[in-house]
Image: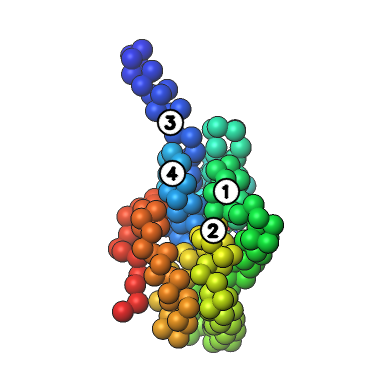
């Protein structure tokens, strides 16, 4: 490489503070939305989980659980997997979207854990059984859809009390919203959950959410109930 080109490449690398390894899924979008919300410089690397990219040795060095998303922060040298941990890390790094006021701080953690332990795994099972394997396991379809509807009810109740999960818009909303954006896959009518619908539309209208939604591959637009 020419010395000048070398210098340009080095400068570009310095600007790209964070490498994001991701795919167009709810867990991946949590992190691209947060990066966009924080205005951090990042490079998105597509890990096509349909083609098995998550099992490639280079990716496993960053994410030994063979799942997206994962990041490498060149500013600190830290590599991280697990979307909830990444959201907390980025919120702490930037001082954004995670209140330091104790009550709001712990409510953010509480709703983030609710998403990580409840919404993500349960809605994921709904996608597996109801969308992709319909008719093969009626018991599992019913079990996971019933649980998803229970979780939608909990979400609707909370959003009837507060504008966002922890009061102000936070990493807890960024973790939950991408899963709700798959409401069609879940055969869920958002009109049945009016507070969720209000919250869903408000978040969808944020420019950073629109940008983060299309990382790493441009998709048809954000699903929007009529
Ligand atoms: N708890 C993990 C779940 C990550 C996860 O399940 N990622 C999926 C895509 S949404 C994946 O990479 N799947 C690849 C596989 O199952 O091999 C997180 O929140 O980061």
Give the mark, 3 or 2, whose residue is nearer the N terminus.
3
- Alpha carbons under labels 1 and 2: distance apart: 9 Å
User: Considering only order in the chain, which callout, 2 or 4, is on the residue closer to the N terminus?
Assistant: 4
Residue 15: assigned label: 3
Q: CA distance from mark 1 to mark 4?
A: 12 Å
Considering depth in this image, is 52 or 26 the residue closer to the camera?
26
Mark drawn on residue 91: 1
Snapshot quadrant of residue 204: bottom left
Mark earlier in primary sequence (1, 4): 4
The alpha-carbon separation of the residues under discs 3 and 1 comes to: 20 Å
Q: How is the image coloured?
A: rainbow
Residue 226 location in percent, x, y?
Answer: 31, 79
Callout 2: helix, strand or loop?
A: loop
Q: Secondary structure at mark 3?
A: helix
Mark identifier at residue 170: 2
- Residue at the location (36% across, 55% down)? 207
């Amino acid at each position: 490489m020419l010395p000048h080109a070398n210098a340009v490449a080095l400068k570009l690398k310095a600007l790209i503070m964070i490498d994001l390894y991701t795919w167009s899924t709810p867990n991946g979008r949590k992190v691209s939305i947060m990066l966009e919300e924080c205005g951090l410089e990042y490079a998105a690397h597509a890990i096509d989980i349909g083609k098995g990219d998550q099992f490639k040795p280079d990716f496993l060095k960053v994410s030994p659980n063979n799942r997206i998303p994962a990041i490498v922060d060149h500013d600190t040298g830290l590599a991280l997997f697990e979307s909830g941990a990444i959201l907390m890390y980025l919120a702490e790094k930037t001082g954004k979207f995670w209140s330091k006021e104790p009550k709001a701080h712990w409510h953010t953690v509480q709703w983030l854990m609710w998403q990580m332990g409840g919404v993500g795994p349960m809605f994921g099972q709904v996608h597996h059984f109801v969308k992709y394997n319909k008719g093969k396991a009626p018991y599992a379809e019913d079990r996971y859809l019933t649980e998803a509807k229970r979780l939608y009810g909990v979400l609707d109740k909370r959003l009837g009390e507060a504008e966002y999960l922890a009061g102000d818009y936070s990493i807890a909303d960024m973790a939950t919203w991408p899963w709700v954006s798959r409401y069609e896959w879940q055969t869920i009518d958002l009109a049945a959950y009016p507070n969720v619908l209000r919250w869903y539309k408000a978040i969808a209208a944020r420019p950073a959410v629109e940008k983060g939604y299309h990382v790493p591959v441009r998709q048809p637009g954000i699903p929007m109930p009529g």
